Image (tube, rainbow, N blue to C red):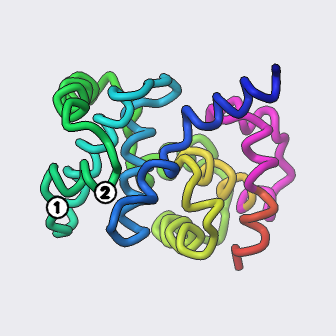
Amino acid sequence: MNTDMRTLRKKSTNIYDIIDKLKVPNYIKNLINDRYFQLVGKKTLRKDNRRGLIAVISYNICVKNNQLKMYHEIVNDLGIKETAIPKGKKLYNKYTKNDRKLVRLDISKLVYKMLDMYGDIDLSVDRNSIIEIYHNLKEKSEKISRAKPQSIAATLLFYLIKKHVEIDKKSFCKKVKVSTITIDKFLPEIKLYCY
């Protein structure tokens, strides 16, 4: 029974099972995934609400990145019902209505915010280089490219800080608001691909 619940939970938070069907480049799929989790966070959406929101996000990301896709093409690619689109638009408008209430930081703001918490540590790497490292990691590793931006940014900073200063993992995780399990999950991957 527990295994079934874990499997269900994983399926409800993983949108790659749906967006892998989209006929767009992988970096667009990564942007869609990031945007979905920026908007939804830890909430769990079901069936048409989830699929509709994914379709609307996919359309908006495709338009912004000059990947011309119409709603009916996205609906066909994703294999969802047309009736899911209005539900998706309603949710998209709800989640984007008041940006200040949403935790929707792009990666550079996220990295800067985390670095400001540890401003007295010299990492011998400037902020822009850290963001560049983050994007390189996303290209090299599928596991990293499918993860939440907050998780990878936090793990990358933990890795860089740990190289220069002895740091307590639990206090770091409290400061940046990620779990120690998240750090443990992505740290080996970052060590493998970073430098």
Kind of residue at badge 1: Lys
Count the numbered circles shown: 2
Residue 162 sits above or below residue 96 on the image:
below
Principal secondary structure, stretch drawn in magenta: helix
Secondary structure under tag 2 reads helix
Return the x and y of residue 114 as percentages of the image width and height. 56, 45
Q: Residue at x 34, y 28 (%)?
A: 48
Return the x and y of residue 92 as percentages of the image width and height. 24, 31
Q: Which residue is labeled 2 in the image? A: 77
Disc 1 and disc 2 in contact, CB within 8 angstroms? yes
Q: Where does the magenta region start and end?
A: 160-186
Q: Residue at x 75, y 64 (%)?
A: 189
Return the x and y of residue 141 as percentages of the image width and height. 63, 70
Secondary structure under tag 1 reads loop
Quadrant occupied by the N terminus: top right
Left or right: 115 with respect to 51? right
Q: Which residue is labeled 1 in the image? A: 69
Q: Quadrant of residue 96?
A: top left
Return the x and y of residue 84 as percentages of the image width and height. 25, 31
Left or right: 5 with respect to 23? right
Q: CA distance from mark 1 to mark 2?
A: 10 Å
Q: Is residue 92 magenta?
A: no
Q: Nearer the viewer, residue 126 or 89?
A: 89
How many residues crowd around disc 2 within 10 Å: few (fewer than 14), some, or many (20 or more)? some
